[in-house]
Image: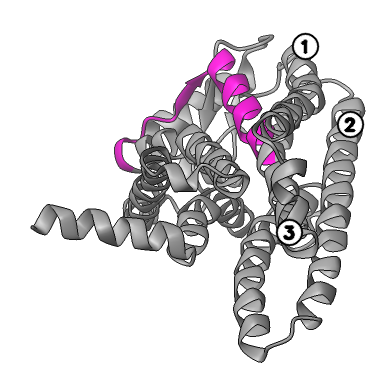
Amino acid sequence: MQETPLSCRGGHFLCHTMTVSNTTDFTNPSTFILLGIPGLEMAHVWISIPYCIMYVIAILGNFTILFIVEREPSLHEPMYYFLCMLAVTDLVLCTSVLPKTLTIFLFNSREINFSACLTQMYFIHGFSVVESGIFVAMAFDRYVAICDPLRHSTILTNLIVSQIGLAVLLRSSVLVLPCVLLARQWPYCRTNIIPHSYCEHMAVVNLACADIRISSYYGLSVVILVTTMDALLIAVSYTQIVRAILRLPTKDARLKTFGTCGSHICVILTFYSPALFTFLSHRFRQNVPLHFHILIANVNLMVPPMLNPIIYGVRTKQIRDRLLHLFTQRKT
């Protein structure tokens, strides 16, 4: 007796879709079907609750950062400009994923247009590369501020900060756009069912009935290049920062600076660790359950946008003081 496909256990509509998809030849389908988290269909509604909470926190937190920095002239400095870039990037990342994922979980709305799927793929992977670049820029800003504070304002002028932002965005577009263009040109004649909650690059191109090694190798090269280069630059910056901190005259000054840098490093590890696990497990998956892989992939896109405004915002005295000032003004 032939075993029923996993996706067919979720409902009649999905069984019918898979049957049609597996028996009909088509090229570049007009729609894909996102399964959500295969194997956990019965828990989709419950899973949507923490997803909603994280999304609301991410939206409120990042918009609060943008609002406070825009309203307070004393925060118009490179550190806070980079923080605003990070907030915008986080808003784009979580909004690219969460609304569609929640419609899958809550309303069983699994269809996504082919072009919309590729657009989602571009925004997810593109702005993940942007976020990595912003972490490098923020590490460089902290390096200059701590190791060469007298020249900080002359090195990181508003023009230089804007040029860094544009360079980070341009690098992302140049590296990620070929992934999307390659995915678009493959013929999809096996199935249009994506075993994922969003249009992840390899989850999509694995459906192609063609030799996709160029897509796989190019995607792997981009991840290795970006991760290795950015992690190395961040490590060099923070190594110099630690050396400078250890030379500070008082213990209180060292502890205060270590606390700030430590929170930054935690954010960076929170971003890179799940991303690397997700990427490598998708290509070299050995005994990793599919639902666990997808959950980690979603954590990678939801947790950093939720934590970044908390760690960078609440732990930054100027932003914290301004936020408290706004609340006290409203009460009076």
| Amino acid type, label 1 | Gln
Examine the image and state in which quarter residue 50 appears: bottom left
Kind of residue indicated by mark 2 = Tyr
Mark 2 lies on residue: 218
> Observer-nearest residue: 20 or 108?
108
In the image, taking residue 48 as reference, residue 125 lies left or right, namely right
Q: Is residue 88 left or right of residue 126?
A: left
Query: Residue tagged by mark 1?
Result: 185
Q: Amino acid at mark 3?
A: Pro
**Most prominent secondary structure in the magenta stretch?**
helix
In this view, which residue lies farthest toward the bottom? 251
Nearer the N terminus, badge 2 or badge 3?
3
Q: Residues within 10 Å of mark 2 (few under 14, many from 20)?
A: some
Q: Is residue 183 above or below residue 300?
A: above
Query: From which residue to which does the magenta span run?
Result: 106-128
- Mark 3 is surrounded, within 10 Å at the Cα level, by few (under 14), some (14 to 19) or many (20 or more) other residues, namely few
Q: Which residue is mark 3?
A: 149
Label 2, label 3: how far apart the Cα atoms are: 40 Å
Q: Measured from the top left, where is residue 267 in percent x and y?
A: 61, 62
Q: Is residue 309 visible?
A: yes
Q: Residue at x 87, y 40 (%)?
A: 220
Q: Can residue 5 be seen by looking at this rendering?
A: no
